Amino acid sequence: MSNKRLVQALQYLLLTAVLILALAPIMLMWMSAFKTRQEISVAPLALPTSLTLDNLQQAWTVGRFGQYVGNSILVTIPVVIGVVALAALAGYGFARFRFWGHQVIFYAFLIGLMVPFQSIMIPLYFNIRGLGLLGTYWAMILPAIGLGLPFGIFLLQSFFRGLPHELGDSARVDGCNEFQVFWRVLLP
């Protein structure tokens, strides 16, 4: 029994060391954020002697960090909504319906998981330029949705396939059409 506890203690010790290594750069960054430039150059690993918010204020204004956070939000929200909405509909269709060529189409989507972004980067640029979207948020949103769809469809198709068919059947008996079965019963 003590051998088992020793092994467990060593595992926790190893995990704690890995945690410290992972958090050290983040802690160092935040410690430096509250120091003056002189303190950073004299003692970069020491705790700040006096707290200052000048670095954070400068990052927000001069470094335009606020604008970058806003841009990230303006791009991320439509991408997440678009990928979840389209992947959920496609995943539901692939999981619940059998139609001619459904496996071929599904595998065509899965090929998108295997294509590295670097191989489509230049043609994608020319397509975006041809559509007149360069310099707009849509130039980031639309490709991100397209690149996120293969994994989203794969994940949600597996999810819908794992749900019992009786859930949909009981909803249809209660008067739901197919979209209501998807939206009100299976998606939640």
Image (cartoon, rainbow, N blue to C red):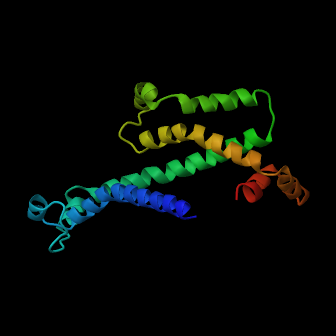
Left or right: where 170 falls relative to 34: right
Q: Nearer the viewer, residue 10 or 65?
A: 10
Left or right: where 89 falls relative to 123: right
Vertical placement of residue 96 versus 56, above or below = above
- Residue 112 occupies quadrant: top right
Q: Please, which residue is most extreme toward the front here?
A: 2
- Residue 21 occupies quadrant: bottom left
Vertical placement of residue 23 versus 122, above or below = below
Q: Position of residue 95 (x, y in %)?
A: 75, 41
Q: Position of residue 87 (x, y in %)?
A: 63, 44
Q: Nearer the viewer, residue 188 or 74?
A: 188
- Which residue shows up at 42% across the image and 60% down it? 13
Q: Nearer the viewer, residue 135 or 171?
A: 171
The quadrant in which the N terminus is found is bottom right
The quadrant in which the C terminus is found is bottom right
Vertical placement of residue 53 versus 17, above or below = below
Q: Please, which residue is most extreme toward the right here?
A: 173
Left or right: where 28 falls relative to 155: left
Tally of numbered tags:
0
- Which residue shows up at 23% across the image and 59% down it? 59
Q: Position of residue 60 (x, y in %)?
A: 25, 61
- Which residue shows up at 75% across the image and 55% down it? 186
Q: Position of residue 15 (x, y in %)?
A: 44, 57
Vertical placement of residue 41 versus 106, above or below = below
